[in-house]
Image (cartoon, rainbow, N blue to C red):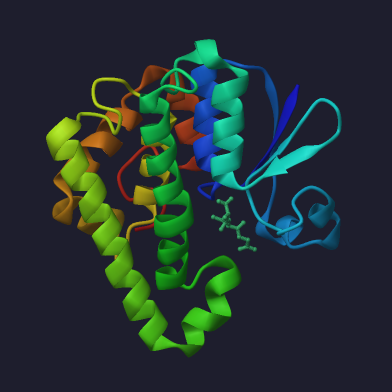
Amino acid sequence: MYKLYNVKAWGSLSIHLLLEELGVPYTNIWMTADQVREPEYLQINPLGMIPALGLADGRSLFESAAIISFLVAAHPDGGMSPALGSNDYGEFMSLLHLMSTELYPTISLASGNSAYAETSAQDTHIVATATALADRYWQLLDDRLAKHGPWLMGKEFSALDLYCFMLSIWGKPSEAALHERFPRIAKLAAAVRARPKLKAALESHGVVDLGGYGG
Ligand SMILES: N[C@@H](CCC(=O)N[C@@H](CS)C(=O)NCC(=O)O)C(=O)O
């Protein structure tokens, strides 16, 4: 059985929602920020970050996009990605990596979160650059939804939409402000929130309502 190392409204939210959509059994391990920063947790995720996914053989996976790629491949009948190896899957991977390697760090830098806190606090130029880059990526995603929506993979809901939702709740200066500027992201977030399978998990992270994360 999987073990999900989980902090409320942190990067594990997307994995938590994906496990719920897939309907696979897992043990949920709620962590505090302090526990994540304990040296013992480095055995689970050497980066000292959330998320991490423990496997039945004792190993653990880290990096959110890697965990998502693993889960959709390990549970291909779960319907949370296009068919593995198809061109659509290639497109799915491009968008997943755009969000995880470009958008996620720019959001973290712009908000001074996590490993970036010191850099962001010291360098206002970096914060401005990260904010502008994040806007550019949000626009790209919003434009794609306008053209090919309602979901990032068109008519097919997928793990990408859960990931995009997670990033959107961290919108600055608030989630509502992000929604005003990017209306298709707002629509996607509302549609994710309306999915019956996700009700309990969304409640447990305190993100049922717009701005639940504090923005
Ligand atoms: N590249 C990592 C980024 C994960 C990340 O930034 N996680 C943040 C929470 S959203 C974290 O665990 N920060 C550790 C801390 O603030 O101590 C991934 O995609 O998994």
Q: Is residue 201 visible?
A: yes
26 to 16, vertically: above or below = above
Q: Nearer the viewer, residue 178 or 98?
A: 98
Instruction: Determine the residue positioned at 61% across, 37% down.
Output: 67
The image position of residue 143, as x and y in percent, is: 16, 45
Instruction: Determine the residue positioned at 30% across, 29% down.
Output: 153
The image position of residue 28, as x and y in percent, is: 68, 32
Q: Nearer the viewer, residue 152 or 39?
A: 152
Left or right of 41? Residue 30 is left
The image position of residue 183, as x and y in percent, is: 15, 45
127 to 144, vertically: above or below = below
Q: Which quarter of the figure has residue 103?
A: bottom left
Ligand 1 is in which quadrant of the figure?
Answer: bottom right
153 to 74, vertically: above or below = below
Q: Which quarter of the figure has residue 193?
A: top left
Looking at the rendering, in which quadrant would you find the N terminus?
top right
Left or right of 95? Residue 40 is right
41 to 71, vertically: above or below = below
Instruction: Determine the residue positioned at 25% across, 46% down.
Output: 141
Instruction: Determine the residue positioned at 86% across, 33% down.
Output: 58
Q: Nearer the viewer, residue 83 or 75?
A: 83
Left or right of 56? Residue 199 is left
Q: How many marks?
A: 0
The image position of residue 149, as x and y in percent, is: 19, 30
Q: Hey, which residue is sitting farthest top in the picture?
A: 77
Q: Nearer the viewer, residue 72 or 128?
A: 72
Looking at the rendering, in which quadrant would you find the C terminus?
bottom left
Q: Is residue 158 visible?
A: no
